[in-house]
Image (cartoon, helix red, strand yellow):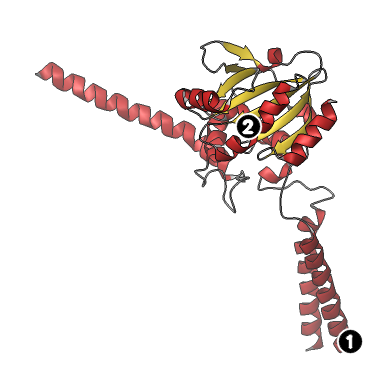
Amino acid sequence: MSKNFKLISIVLFTLFSFFILLKGLDKSNIYSPEIKESNVDFNFKAKYLFSEEEVFINELLNNEGMSLINIWASWCLPCRDEHAYLLNLNSLNKLSIIGINYKDDEKNAKQFLSELGNPYTNIITDPKGINSIEFGAFGVPETYLIDNKSKLIIQKFIGPLDDKAFAKIINIIQ
Amino acid sequence: MKKIKILFRLIIILLFFQNYCLAETSQEVDKISKNLRCLICQGQSVYDSQSDFALSMKILIQNKIDEGKNDEQIYEYLKAKYGEWIVYDPEINKNTILLWVLPLILFVFGGILILRKVSIK
Protein backbone atom coordinates (compact mmCIF):
# COMPACT_ATOMS: atom_id res chain seq x y z
CA MET A 1 0.00 0.00 0.00
CA SER A 2 2.70 2.40 1.06
CA LYS A 3 4.80 1.49 -1.95
CA ASN A 4 1.85 2.10 -4.26
CA PHE A 5 1.13 5.45 -2.67
CA LYS A 6 4.72 6.54 -3.09
CA LEU A 7 4.83 5.45 -6.71
CA ILE A 8 1.53 7.09 -7.55
CA SER A 9 2.48 10.34 -5.86
CA ILE A 10 5.85 10.46 -7.60
CA VAL A 11 4.21 9.82 -10.98
CA LEU A 12 1.53 12.42 -10.27
CA PHE A 13 4.09 14.98 -9.15
CA THR A 14 6.26 14.36 -12.21
CA LEU A 15 3.28 14.72 -14.51
CA PHE A 16 2.19 17.87 -12.70
CA SER A 17 5.65 19.46 -13.01
CA PHE A 18 5.90 18.34 -16.62
CA PHE A 19 2.67 20.05 -17.63
CA ILE A 20 3.49 23.21 -15.75
CA LEU A 21 6.86 23.46 -17.50
CA LEU A 22 5.27 22.58 -20.84
CA LYS A 23 2.76 25.36 -20.39
CA GLY A 24 5.60 27.70 -19.44
CA LEU A 25 7.41 26.88 -22.69
CA ASP A 26 4.37 27.80 -24.73
CA LYS A 27 4.07 31.20 -23.19
CA SER A 28 5.97 34.01 -24.85
CA ASN A 29 8.59 35.65 -22.67
CA ILE A 30 8.07 39.09 -24.10
CA TYR A 31 6.14 41.07 -21.59
CA SER A 32 3.80 43.79 -22.76
CA PRO A 33 1.34 45.39 -20.41
CA GLU A 34 -2.33 45.47 -21.23
CA ILE A 35 -3.38 48.86 -22.41
CA LYS A 36 -5.19 50.58 -19.63
CA GLU A 37 -6.53 53.53 -21.54
CA SER A 38 -8.57 55.10 -18.84
CA ASN A 39 -5.54 55.57 -16.68
CA VAL A 40 -3.69 57.99 -18.91
CA ASP A 41 -4.26 61.40 -17.47
CA PHE A 42 -3.36 64.02 -20.05
CA ASN A 43 -3.78 66.76 -17.55
CA PHE A 44 -0.13 67.50 -16.95
CA LYS A 45 2.13 70.34 -17.96
CA ALA A 46 5.20 70.20 -20.15
CA LYS A 47 7.52 72.74 -21.73
CA TYR A 48 7.55 73.32 -25.49
CA LEU A 49 10.76 72.57 -27.30
CA PHE A 50 12.45 75.78 -28.57
CA SER A 51 10.34 77.96 -26.31
CA GLU A 52 10.00 78.60 -22.61
CA GLU A 53 6.21 78.31 -22.67
CA GLU A 54 4.43 75.51 -20.89
CA VAL A 55 1.30 73.73 -22.00
CA PHE A 56 -1.16 71.11 -20.76
CA ILE A 57 -1.13 68.00 -22.97
CA ASN A 58 -4.92 68.15 -22.91
CA GLU A 59 -4.85 71.40 -24.84
CA LEU A 60 -2.77 69.86 -27.62
CA LEU A 61 -5.38 67.20 -28.33
CA ASN A 62 -8.20 68.75 -30.36
CA ASN A 63 -11.65 67.47 -29.78
CA GLU A 64 -11.91 65.82 -33.16
CA GLY A 65 -10.00 63.19 -35.04
CA MET A 66 -6.91 61.48 -33.79
CA SER A 67 -3.45 62.35 -32.61
CA LEU A 68 -0.21 60.50 -32.75
CA ILE A 69 2.12 60.90 -29.81
CA ASN A 70 5.69 60.00 -30.60
CA ILE A 71 8.48 59.80 -28.03
CA TRP A 72 11.83 60.50 -29.67
CA ALA A 73 15.36 61.75 -29.05
CA SER A 74 18.20 62.86 -31.29
CA TRP A 75 20.55 60.34 -29.66
CA CYS A 76 18.21 57.46 -30.41
CA LEU A 77 19.21 55.59 -33.57
CA PRO A 78 15.94 53.70 -34.18
CA CYS A 79 14.22 57.12 -34.13
CA ARG A 80 16.11 57.99 -37.31
CA ASP A 81 14.77 54.86 -38.96
CA GLU A 82 11.16 55.59 -38.09
CA HIS A 83 11.34 59.29 -38.98
CA ALA A 84 10.40 58.71 -42.63
CA TYR A 85 7.16 57.06 -41.51
CA LEU A 86 6.28 60.08 -39.38
CA LEU A 87 6.99 62.49 -42.26
CA ASN A 88 4.81 60.34 -44.45
CA LEU A 89 1.96 60.33 -41.93
CA ASN A 90 2.22 64.08 -41.55
CA SER A 91 1.94 64.61 -45.30
CA LEU A 92 -1.45 62.86 -45.22
CA ASN A 93 -2.83 65.71 -43.07
CA LYS A 94 -5.15 63.32 -41.28
CA LEU A 95 -3.80 63.62 -37.76
CA SER A 96 -1.70 65.88 -35.62
CA ILE A 97 1.61 64.45 -34.52
CA ILE A 98 2.81 65.45 -31.07
CA GLY A 99 6.47 64.81 -30.36
CA ILE A 100 7.85 64.23 -26.90
CA ASN A 101 11.56 64.99 -26.91
CA TYR A 102 12.97 62.51 -24.40
CA LYS A 103 16.05 63.40 -22.30
CA ASP A 104 17.58 65.36 -25.12
CA ASP A 105 19.78 68.37 -25.73
CA GLU A 106 17.89 71.21 -27.39
CA LYS A 107 20.67 71.95 -29.85
CA ASN A 108 20.94 68.32 -30.94
CA ALA A 109 17.17 68.05 -31.25
CA LYS A 110 17.14 71.11 -33.52
CA GLN A 111 19.88 69.67 -35.68
CA PHE A 112 18.08 66.33 -35.90
CA LEU A 113 14.93 68.04 -37.17
CA SER A 114 16.69 70.32 -39.64
CA GLU A 115 18.56 67.32 -41.01
CA LEU A 116 15.63 64.90 -41.33
CA GLY A 117 12.61 67.21 -41.45
CA ASN A 118 9.98 68.09 -38.88
CA PRO A 119 6.80 66.00 -38.96
CA TYR A 120 5.52 67.27 -35.62
CA THR A 121 2.64 69.65 -35.11
CA ASN A 122 3.84 70.36 -31.59
CA ILE A 123 6.88 69.23 -29.67
CA ILE A 124 7.13 69.15 -25.90
CA THR A 125 10.17 68.28 -23.86
CA ASP A 126 10.72 65.58 -21.30
CA PRO A 127 14.16 66.28 -19.82
CA LYS A 128 13.76 63.90 -16.89
CA GLY A 129 11.70 61.20 -18.58
CA ILE A 130 8.80 61.71 -16.19
CA ASN A 131 6.20 62.76 -18.76
CA SER A 132 6.80 59.58 -20.72
CA ILE A 133 6.04 57.53 -17.64
CA GLU A 134 2.59 59.15 -17.61
CA PHE A 135 1.96 57.32 -20.87
CA GLY A 136 3.40 54.09 -19.49
CA ALA A 137 6.44 54.29 -21.76
CA PHE A 138 9.53 52.11 -21.41
CA GLY A 139 11.93 54.26 -23.43
CA VAL A 140 12.46 55.64 -26.93
CA PRO A 141 11.02 55.36 -29.49
CA GLU A 142 7.40 54.75 -28.65
CA THR A 143 4.25 55.85 -30.44
CA TYR A 144 0.64 56.09 -29.34
CA LEU A 145 -2.41 56.60 -31.48
CA ILE A 146 -4.95 58.57 -29.49
CA ASP A 147 -8.59 59.28 -30.08
CA ASN A 148 -8.93 63.00 -29.37
CA LYS A 149 -12.54 62.94 -28.28
CA SER A 150 -12.48 60.07 -25.81
CA LYS A 151 -8.79 60.64 -24.93
CA LEU A 152 -8.13 56.93 -25.16
CA ILE A 153 -5.02 55.23 -26.46
CA ILE A 154 -6.23 53.21 -29.44
CA GLN A 155 -2.94 51.65 -30.32
CA LYS A 156 0.47 51.48 -28.71
CA PHE A 157 3.67 50.87 -30.67
CA ILE A 158 6.68 49.99 -28.56
CA GLY A 159 9.90 50.43 -30.53
CA PRO A 160 10.36 52.09 -33.94
CA LEU A 161 7.49 52.23 -36.42
CA ASP A 162 7.78 49.78 -39.30
CA ASP A 163 5.78 48.89 -42.42
CA LYS A 164 3.35 46.85 -40.38
CA ALA A 165 2.73 49.58 -37.80
CA PHE A 166 2.44 52.19 -40.57
CA ALA A 167 -0.17 50.12 -42.41
CA LYS A 168 -2.08 49.67 -39.18
CA ILE A 169 -2.15 53.43 -38.49
CA ILE A 170 -3.27 54.20 -42.05
CA ASN A 171 -5.97 51.58 -41.70
CA ILE A 172 -7.29 53.08 -38.50
CA ILE A 173 -7.28 56.74 -39.55
CA GLN A 174 -9.00 56.14 -42.88
CA MET B 1 40.05 85.85 11.52
CA LYS B 2 37.78 84.59 14.26
CA LYS B 3 34.73 85.60 12.29
CA ILE B 4 35.95 83.65 9.29
CA LYS B 5 36.43 80.61 11.48
CA ILE B 6 32.89 80.85 12.83
CA LEU B 7 31.51 81.32 9.34
CA PHE B 8 33.49 78.32 8.14
CA ARG B 9 32.09 76.16 10.94
CA LEU B 10 28.57 77.33 10.20
CA ILE B 11 28.94 76.38 6.56
CA ILE B 12 30.19 72.93 7.50
CA ILE B 13 27.26 72.41 9.85
CA LEU B 14 24.82 73.57 7.19
CA LEU B 15 26.33 71.24 4.61
CA PHE B 16 26.12 68.36 7.04
CA PHE B 17 22.53 69.15 7.84
CA GLN B 18 21.63 69.38 4.17
CA ASN B 19 23.21 65.99 3.51
CA TYR B 20 21.25 64.56 6.38
CA CYS B 21 17.98 65.86 4.96
CA LEU B 22 18.76 64.54 1.49
CA ALA B 23 19.60 61.13 2.90
CA GLU B 24 16.33 61.08 4.77
CA THR B 25 14.19 61.61 1.67
CA SER B 26 16.17 59.31 -0.59
CA GLN B 27 15.74 56.49 1.91
CA GLU B 28 12.03 56.52 1.16
CA VAL B 29 12.75 56.41 -2.59
CA ASP B 30 15.17 53.52 -2.04
CA LYS B 31 12.57 51.60 -0.09
CA ILE B 32 9.92 51.96 -2.79
CA SER B 33 12.25 51.42 -5.75
CA LYS B 34 13.53 48.17 -4.22
CA ASN B 35 10.02 46.79 -4.54
CA LEU B 36 9.71 47.75 -8.20
CA ARG B 37 10.86 45.66 -11.12
CA CYS B 38 12.90 47.48 -13.74
CA LEU B 39 10.83 46.49 -16.77
CA ILE B 40 13.54 46.90 -19.37
CA CYS B 41 16.36 45.25 -17.42
CA GLN B 42 16.84 41.56 -16.80
CA GLY B 43 16.37 40.60 -13.18
CA GLN B 44 17.06 44.01 -11.64
CA SER B 45 14.97 46.21 -9.45
CA VAL B 46 14.49 49.90 -10.19
CA TYR B 47 16.76 50.55 -7.21
CA ASP B 48 19.63 48.49 -8.66
CA SER B 49 19.37 49.73 -12.21
CA GLN B 50 21.03 52.75 -13.78
CA SER B 51 18.99 52.57 -16.99
CA ASP B 52 17.17 55.67 -18.26
CA PHE B 53 13.88 54.08 -17.33
CA ALA B 54 14.94 53.38 -13.74
CA LEU B 55 16.51 56.83 -13.26
CA SER B 56 13.30 58.54 -14.41
CA MET B 57 11.29 56.26 -12.20
CA LYS B 58 13.32 57.29 -9.14
CA ILE B 59 12.76 60.98 -9.91
CA LEU B 60 9.06 60.30 -10.35
CA ILE B 61 8.86 58.48 -7.01
CA GLN B 62 10.59 61.41 -5.32
CA ASN B 63 8.08 63.81 -6.92
CA LYS B 64 5.16 61.69 -5.77
CA ILE B 65 6.54 61.63 -2.23
CA ASP B 66 6.92 65.41 -2.34
CA GLU B 67 3.28 65.62 -3.42
CA GLY B 68 2.41 63.79 -0.23
CA LYS B 69 1.53 60.41 -1.72
CA ASN B 70 2.16 57.35 0.45
CA ASP B 71 3.78 54.05 -0.61
CA GLU B 72 0.52 52.34 -1.40
CA GLN B 73 -0.69 55.18 -3.64
CA ILE B 74 2.59 55.19 -5.56
CA TYR B 75 2.43 51.42 -6.14
CA GLU B 76 -1.18 51.74 -7.29
CA TYR B 77 -0.27 54.57 -9.66
CA LEU B 78 2.53 52.56 -11.24
CA LYS B 79 0.45 49.38 -11.41
CA ALA B 80 -2.20 51.30 -13.32
CA LYS B 81 0.45 52.42 -15.83
CA TYR B 82 2.55 49.29 -16.20
CA GLY B 83 0.43 46.47 -14.83
CA GLU B 84 0.85 44.04 -11.97
CA TRP B 85 4.26 42.95 -13.25
CA ILE B 86 6.05 46.07 -11.99
CA VAL B 87 5.71 45.18 -8.30
CA TYR B 88 7.62 42.28 -6.81
CA ASP B 89 4.74 41.40 -4.51
CA PRO B 90 1.97 39.96 -6.69
CA GLU B 91 -1.64 40.19 -5.58
CA ILE B 92 -3.73 37.07 -5.18
CA ASN B 93 -5.97 36.74 -8.23
CA LYS B 94 -6.85 34.04 -10.70
CA ASN B 95 -3.55 34.38 -12.55
CA THR B 96 -1.37 34.18 -9.47
CA ILE B 97 -3.35 31.78 -7.30
CA LEU B 98 -1.12 28.83 -8.28
CA LEU B 99 1.95 30.82 -7.29
CA TRP B 100 0.56 31.37 -3.82
CA VAL B 101 -1.05 27.99 -3.27
CA LEU B 102 1.67 25.74 -4.71
CA PRO B 103 4.13 26.08 -1.78
CA LEU B 104 1.28 25.28 0.59
CA ILE B 105 0.32 22.18 -1.37
CA LEU B 106 3.95 21.04 -1.47
CA PHE B 107 4.26 21.64 2.26
CA VAL B 108 1.18 19.56 3.08
CA PHE B 109 2.24 16.88 0.64
CA GLY B 110 5.72 16.68 2.20
CA GLY B 111 4.17 16.55 5.65
CA ILE B 112 2.01 13.59 4.65
CA LEU B 113 5.05 11.78 3.24
CA ILE B 114 7.03 12.32 6.45
CA LEU B 115 4.12 11.31 8.68
CA ARG B 116 3.63 8.11 6.72
CA LYS B 117 7.31 7.25 6.95
CA VAL B 118 7.35 7.89 10.72
CA SER B 119 4.15 5.94 11.39
CA ILE B 120 5.43 2.96 9.40
CA LYS B 121 8.59 2.81 11.51
Residue at image location 41% in from the left, 29% down from the top: B21
Quarter the C terminus of chain B occupies? bottom right
Q: Secondary structure at mark 1?
A: helix
Spatial distance from mark 2 to mark 1, Cα to Cα? Answer: 68 Å
- In the image, is A85 to the left or to the right of B47? right
* Quarter-of-image position of residue A3: bottom right
Q: Is residue B90 above or below residue A154?
A: below
Q: Amino acid at mark 2?
A: His
Q: Quick one: label 2 or label 1, which is nearer the N terminus?
A: 1
Q: Chain of mark 1?
A: A
Can residue A41 be spotted in the picture? Answer: no
Disc on res. B73 = none
**Where does label 2 land, which residue?**
A83
Q: Amino acid at mark 1?
A: Asn
Q: Depth check: B97 or B85 in front?
A: B85
Q: Is residue A70 above or below residue A76?
A: above
Q: Chain of mark 2?
A: A
Residue at image location 53% in from the left, 38% down from the top: B52
Q: Depth check: B8 or A98 in front?
A: A98
* Quarter-of-image position of residue A116: top right
Q: Secondary structure at mark 2?
A: helix
Residue at image location 55% in from the left, 24% down from the top: A113
**Where does label 1 land, which residue?**
A4
Quarter the N terminus of chain B occupies? top left
Q: Depth check: A154 or B120 in front?
A: A154
Q: Depth check: A151 or A113 in front?
A: A113
Residues packed near mark 1 inside 10 Å, few (<14), some (14 to 19) or many (20 plus): few
Residue at image location 79% in from the left, 32% down from the top: A169
